[in-house]
Amino acid sequence: TMAADKSTIPVATSYVILDDTPQSTGVSDYPQRAGNRNRCCFGSLIALFVFLMLFFLIPRNPAIYLKHLEANSDDVISGSFEFKNLNYFDVKWNDLDTNLFWLLDGGQHNICYTSDDDCSFYYLGYCALNIGSFNDESKFQTSSRSNAKRSVELYQSDQQIQCSKLMIGNSLLSYQSLLLKGSVHAKSNTRNFGKVHVKKSIYRFGL
């Protein structure tokens, strides 16, 4: 047999390694990412809208304050009231019904009355003598985030007038302690707040 000539056998000088990893097709996923971003932005806008709606529409209780008392030369007492609307919508007010009490300690209550039962109640150890009421049935309205001030005259019986004159006379020597109790009715087109009570506070009256 004839031996093969080794010089004629082809010898590979380079190799190609085949990879199983899928190759990119050149198609971008940008539309999918953009769609996700759009959904995210839309959800954020909805959340912001709901937050703003709740912030502006959630009812906040109105408030009433007695700012100051004054007595004229005839010893007629008037009270200056402030009605505060904390809401972002209009509030209607009516039926102010409050009572003013002179706070006395010990047995001083008999300077106005002779009966031991004339104390309407006791507050922080003081006898509370009713010396009149601030009543106003008129209706008025406060716009969004606004206040209204009204002056109301103190309604008194003859006995209460004599008692308040004593209180005014004593105020020339020292401040007298007074307490206001009562409420006013408030409502809006979306919420009936009912009776809004005056915050209990001791007022110092002096001339």
Image (tube, rainbow, N blue to C red):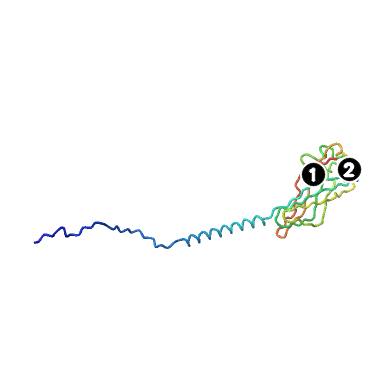
Q: Residue at x 86, y 36 (%)?
A: 173
| Label 2 sits on residue | 165
CA neighbours of label 2 inside 10 A, class few (<14), some (14 to 19), many (20+): some
* Residue 112 in which image quadrant: top right
Tag 1, which secondary structure? strand
**Residue 187: x and y, percent?**
74, 57
Name the quadrant of the N terminus: bottom left
* Residue 203 in which image quadrant: top right
Tag 2 and tag 1, C-beta contact below 8 Å: no
Relative to 128, residue 149 above or below:
below
Q: Residue at x 74, y 56 (%)?
A: 143
Q: Choose the circle earlier in sequence order: 2 or 1.
A: 2
* Residue 47 in which image quadrant: bottom right
Q: Residue at x 79, y 44 (%)?
A: 179
Relative to 85, residue 31 above or below:
below
Q: Amino acid at mark 2?
A: Lys
**Residue 11: x and y, percent?**
21, 58
**Distance (Cα) linking label 2 and label 1:** 17 Å
Name the quadrant of the C terminus: top right
Q: Residue at x 88, y 47 (%)?
A: 76
| Label 1 sits on residue | 179
Q: Is residue 7 left or right of residue 189?
A: left
Q: Amino acid at mark 1?
A: Leu
**Residue 87: x and y, percent?**
70, 54
Front in this rendered view, residue 163 or 184 = 184
Relative to 77, residue 90 above or below:
below
Front in this rendered view, residue 139 or 146 = 146
Q: Is residue 153 left or right of residue 21?
A: right
**Residue 34: x and y, percent?**
50, 60
Front in this rendered view, residue 31 or 5 = 5
Tag 2, which secondary structure? helix
